[in-house]
């Protein structure tokens, strides 16, 4: 069977929302849809839900199981397995706004010879549906239908609302980097750059469930966010996409500061080094800075270095106190030979920290 669009859904512990997601996928009117669900080692009832839907649609749905490897690896697995002319990505806690979404996207792409086609985006915030966004994320929506170049667009969020020509992704080797966070903007930019242009639809094509889950900013997650942002900085620099570059720098400042500082304050020197290194990719003239002037990173670096110095000082103080205590507890000290027994390093540490 020849498939038109392969819908790739990574699934991990999403039993609460999975039925609604799949219902909106299978109600699509476009003929020839293939649904690829990659179960990323779910431990709740997601596997049973997938089994039930697979029994209903054995010719249209595949379930691929893998050990927990993350959403990026699951989506890549879907790209490799897809048989559709185009692919689209859906998260299992989101849904399509109506039954014509894939039909409209596919028809627009085929009619206009577009390798990528996409529409507007909505955030579901509890009972509220948000379709108007502030300027920094205004690229979530389009105000007209028609072809658009990526140089004109230069946006990085909301990749779910687009279909991508499968052969384009395969021929160009475009995949999601294996990050635990911020893996989709680098993928989106790479696909858009490869295509050069896309067809934009004003109509709503994706509903994203927002704000119901909190992120634990582990060292791995913070580092992966920085890696994703650095990927975009390097890509935008290489292709002369100054607006994307400025947008990414702004996201670093707005979204990265707290997670980075949280981990740096806890002594994550690798993250600090990566942050300092990332600052070298910022193009000063695009940011309105003088040549050689570093962007806001200089302030963050100073704060981070100060935090590390504080952490190191505290660590040294604790070690000094332990060593001093060991000396005081020693038999040599109790017999009155404390001065002779004190090594110079411990003595220096005592002088430095005994006042703390």
Image: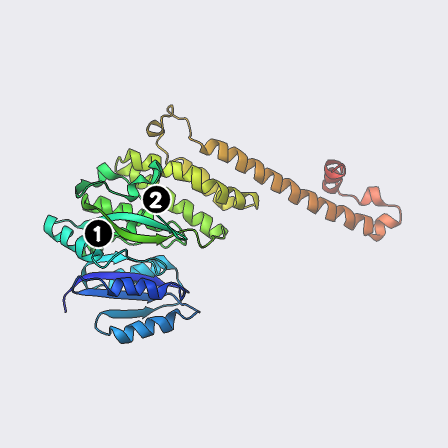
Residue topped by disc 1 = 172
Residue found at the very far top of the displayed protein: 290
Real-space CA distance between mark 2 and mark 1, rounded to the nearest whole angstrom:
17 Å
**Count of numbered circles in the view:** 2
In this view, the residue in front, 180 or 333, is 180
Q: Are marks 2 and 1 in contact (CB under 8 Å)?
A: no
Kind of element beneath mark 2: helix
Inspect this view and state whether residue 352 appears: yes
Q: Quadrant of the N terminus?
A: bottom left
Q: Is residue 163 rendered to the left or right of residue 353?
A: left
Q: Position of residue 193 (x, y in %)?
A: 23, 44
Q: Position of residue 245 (x, y in %)?
A: 33, 36
In this view, the residue in front, 108 or 133, is 133
Kind of element beneath mark 1: loop
Check residue 231 in the rendering and tell me which mark sits there, or answer none: 2
Inspect this view and state whether residue 177 appears: no
Q: Residue at horizontal 31%, vertical 39%?
A: 138
Q: Quadrant of the C terminus?
A: top right
Circle 1 residues within 10 Å: few <14, some 14–19, many ≥20: few
Of callouts 2 and 1, which one flags the residue occurring earlier in the amino acid sequence?
A: 1
Q: Is residue 330 rendered to the left or right of residue 187?
A: right
Q: Is residue 40 above or below residue 176?
A: below
Q: Is residue 265 rendered to the left or right of residue 203?
A: right
Check residue 68 in the rendering and tell me which mark sits there, or answer none: none
In this view, the residue in front, 100 or 159, is 100
In this view, the residue in front, 98 or 236, is 98
Q: Position of residue 307 (x, y in %)?
A: 57, 39
């Amino acid at each position: 069977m020849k498939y038109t669009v392969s819908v790739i859904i990574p699934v991990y512990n999403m039993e609460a929302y999975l039925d609604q997601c799949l219902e909106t996928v299978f109600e699509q009117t476009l003929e020839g849809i293939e649904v690829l669900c990659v179960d990323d080692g779910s431990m709740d009832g997601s596997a049973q839900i997938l089994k039930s839907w697979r029994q209903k649609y054995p010719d249209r749905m595949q379930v691929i199981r893998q050990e927990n490897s993350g959403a990026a690896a699951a989506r890549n697995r879907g790209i490799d397995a897809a048989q559709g002319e185009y692919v689209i990505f859906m998260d299992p806690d989101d849904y399509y706004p109506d039954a014509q979404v894939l039909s409209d996207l596919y028809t627009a792409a085929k009619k206009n010879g577009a390798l990528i086609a996409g529409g507007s985006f909505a955030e579901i915030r509890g009972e509220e549906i948000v379709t108007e966004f502030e300027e920094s994320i205004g690229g979530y929506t389009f105000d007209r239908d028609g072809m658009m170049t990526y140089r004109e667009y230069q946006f990085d969020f909301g990749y779910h609302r687009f279909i991508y020509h499968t052969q384009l992704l395969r021929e160009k080797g475009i995949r999601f980097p294996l990050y635990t966070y911020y893996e989709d903007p680098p993928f989106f930019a790479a696909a858009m750059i490869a295509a050069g242009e896309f067809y934009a639809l004003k109509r709503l094509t994706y509903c994203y469930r927002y704000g119901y889950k909190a992120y634990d900013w582990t060292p791995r997650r913070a580092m992966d966010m920085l890696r994703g942002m650095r990927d975009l900085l390097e890509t935008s620099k290489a292709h002369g996409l100054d607006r994307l570059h400025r947008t990414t720098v702004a996201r670093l400042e707005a979204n990265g500061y707290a997670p980075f500082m949280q981990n740096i304050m806890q002594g994550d020197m690798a993250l600090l080094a990566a942050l300092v290194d990332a600052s070298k990719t910022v193009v000063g003239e695009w940011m309105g800075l003088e040549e050689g002037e570093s962007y806001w990173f200089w302030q963050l670096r100073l704060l981070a270095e100060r935090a590390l110095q504080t952490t190191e000082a505290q660590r040294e103080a604790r070690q000094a106190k332990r060593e001093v205590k060991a000396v005081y507890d020693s038999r040599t000290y109790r017999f009155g030979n404390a001065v002779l027994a004190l090594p110079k390093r411990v003595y220096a540490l005592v002088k430095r920290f005994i006042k703390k």
